[in-house]
Image (cartoon, rainbow, N blue to C red):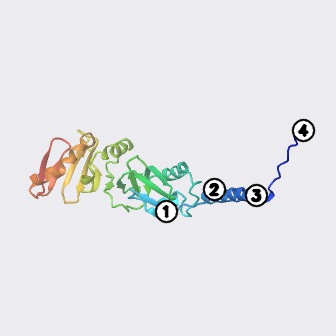
Amino acid sequence: MAKKVKKKRKINLPKVLIAILIAILIIYLLVTLVIKFLNLNIKNIYIINNNLLSDQEIIELSKLEDYPSFLFTSSKKIKEKLKGNVLIKDVNIIKKMDMSITLDITEYEVLFYNESLKETVIENGESIKQENIYNLPILINNPEKTLPKDIFDNLVKKYVQIDKSVREKISEIKYDPNREVDNERFILTMKDGNYVYITLTKIKNINNYEQILPSLEQKKGFLYLDSGQYFEIFK
């Protein structure tokens, strides 16, 4: 019985070479696309909800002024850099696939200007050495009645309880204690020409100022909100 001889299959060299070339080309294209994606820079930077710091200041603080690589720009590091600024409470960073980045800023409130130290006082108790660029109420320390540090710290803590709309009506804050009754009393000079006495324990009373105004019948004087509520017209 004759043995069957297996025929060897011939390799189609041109087809193999074409397949190899196509595979190499696909790999090359994929590698090129990956490298290109990795090297894509940020295209747009959006800054929202900032009032005290300008867009440019925030971009410089976050070190994004050169529009670096989108992929290798760390949101965590941007946040750390921005929160290093005394005015920034928090930041939410949103990165989108259109290569844009949005910085949603939460700022601390600036409260008043400490005239004696030439400092802007912030809600977290920090201060910035600068002129009164935010047109804030001015804290005038009474030279004859020096403002103790513990009372100053309590003023900062309590002042944030005053509504913004009322704060905007205050032009000056002066420490004016009644030694016999209240060591935490202040007198506020209002932009409308009235003066208001308050004590830190009842500081929220001044939030009623806008409701009290009509009862004053456009008269000017001293409004006592530190003990009770009564009005003394200028003599």
Q: Nearer the viewer, mark 1 or mark 3?
A: 3
Helix, strand or loop under label 2: helix
Q: What SS does tag 3 mark?
A: helix
Residue that numbered label 3 is attached to: 15
Q: Please give the residue where the numbered disc 1 appears in the rendered image.
A: 44
Q: Is residue 85 visible?
A: no
Is label 1 or label 4 in front?
4
Q: CA distance from mark 1 to mark 4?
A: 76 Å
Cβ–Cβ under 8 Å for marks 2 and 1 = no
Residue at mark 2? 34
Mark whose residue sits in front, 3 or 2: 3
Query: In this figure, which residue is indicated by the disc labeled 4?
Result: 3
Given the image, on which type of amino acid does mark 2 rest?
Val
Q: What is the distance, in whole Å, between disc 3 and disc 4 at their CAs? A: 33 Å
Q: At numbered mark 4, what does the secondary structure look like: helix, strand or loop?
A: loop
Judge the density around disc 2: few (<14), some (14-19), many (≥20) Cα neighbours within 10 Å.
few
Indicate which disc, 3 or 4, sits on the residue closer to the N terminus.
Answer: 4
Is disc 1 placed on a helix, strand or loop? strand
- Which of the two discs, 2 and 1, labels the residue nearer the N terminus? 2
Say above or below: 131 vs 85: below
Residue drawn at the location 31% of the way across and 47% of the way down: 159
**Amino acid found under the numbered disc labelled 1:** Asn
**What residue occupies the far front of the structure in this picture?**
1
Q: Quadrant of the N terminus?
A: top right
Locate residue 45, reporting x and y percent. Answer: 48, 61
Tell me which residue sits at (63%, 59%) in the image.
33
Q: Nearer the viewer, residue 109 or 219?
A: 109
Relative to 100, say whether 198 is above or below: above
